[in-house]
Image (cartoon, rainbow, N blue to C red):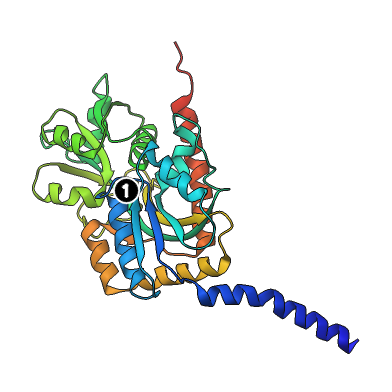
Amino acid sequence: MRNLQWLKRFFLAASVLPGLAFAQAWPSKPIRFVVPLLAGGSVDQTARFFATELGKTIGQAVVVENVPGGNGAIGLDRVAKSAADGYTFVVTANSFQTISPHLSEAPLPYDTTRDFTPVAGFVTVSHIILARPTLPANTLPELVALARATPAGLNHGAASATGASYLASVLFARRAGIKFTDVFYKGAGGVYNDLMGGHIDVFFDSLGSAVPLIASGKVKAIATTMEKRHPLTPTVPTVAESYPGFDTSGWYALYGPAKLPPEVVTKLNAEVRRIQSSPEFLTFAKTYGYEAMSGNAASLAAVQARELAQWGEIAKVLTAPKAK
């Protein structure tokens, strides 16, 4: 009996040793963060900040590689098909993980749940409702009243048909009982040009991008879409103050390929949490209007599952045949 117990302990220890050895040896070479977008955008900026900070403590360089195309699908597919060895990750956004699966024009070559391992949330991004400076509405109730009095609906600029900020506009229009006439652009730059020029009426965008334009008076801030007022715009009310419970936001997070070693997930998540408590992160977040997206890998997976269901319901409305 004693020999049998000893053998059990031996095999249990032997099964744990490979994982411990891997955790101690990782990382032994540079790590790659794939960004499925062009350089210079907010996802890319976030990826580069965390890559720099991680490189200071994990003993290896963290290299950011931009792989744009296919509304994010090309870069995400590359990571989904990479070896799950802890050296290739994707810095992605909720629009790719929870909205594109419902609204992508072409079938995605991967499953955003099955083919990726959630690692850590980086930041959450508040959206803000902006208006042209000359719009005769300064508050959310005034905006809604103006929209209801406009038969064709206010002209709404959208940088993407599958982005989180666009879906926030759809949710708001449904909740407020109004409609927008959507005008789609190839990027936010074109939307801002026409908003400032008075050619469109409203735009839902990430708050950080809008703050300088709000401060200069080039655009008008109507309301933010997170449940609480944002520190960068404390005088701007939230949609929830007029429509209780309304809360939409974007987020950027780190994922690896499916079946990523748990030891890597745990170590990287802890490193991200450490960075989020640093003075460097506080400065970065304040500059761009972000907040830390806290929690472990399981909580990131839960957020993704919840939003997949939420945006799926909205997608049914968007794609339903219109009555003639």
The residue sitting at 43% across, 40% down in the picture is 73
| Camera-nearest residue between 160 and 217 | 160
Image coordinates for residue 320, horizontal then vertical, percent: 48, 23
Is residue 92 rendered to the left or right of residue 205? right
Residue placed under numbered mark 1 in the picture:
241
Is residue 216 rendered to the left or right of residue 235? left
| Camera-nearest residue between 57 and 128 | 57
The residue sitting at 24% across, 23% down in the picture is 149
Look at the picture and state if 187 lies above or below 84: above
Image coordinates for residue 140, horizontal then vertical, percent: 25, 40
Image coordinates for residue 123, horizontal then vertical, percent: 36, 58
Quadrant that contains the C terminus: top left
Is residue 34 rendered to the left or right of residue 16? left
Look at the picture and state if 85 lies above or below 39: below
The residue sitting at 40% across, 66% down in the picture is 30
Q: How many marks?
A: 1
Task: Look at the image and tell me whether residue 62 can be seen.
Answer: yes
Look at the picture and state if 72 lies above or below 178: below
Extreme residue toward the right, this view: 1
Extreme residue toward the bottom, this view: 2
Task: Look at the image and tell me whether residue 276 can be seen.
Answer: no
Image coordinates for residue 285, horizontal then vertical, percent: 27, 62
Quadrant that contains the N terminus: bottom right
- Characterize the local packing of mark 1: few (<14), some (14-19) or many (20 or more) Cα atoms within 10 angstroms: some
| Camera-nearest residue between 42 and 20 | 20
Splitting the image into 4 quarters, where does residue 165 fall? top left
Splitting the image into 4 quarters, where does residue 70 fall? top left
Look at the picture and state if 62 lies above or below 192: below
Extreme residue toward the front, this view: 29
Extreme residue toward the top, this view: 324
Disc 1 residue type? Glu
The residue sitting at 54% across, 74% down in the picture is 23
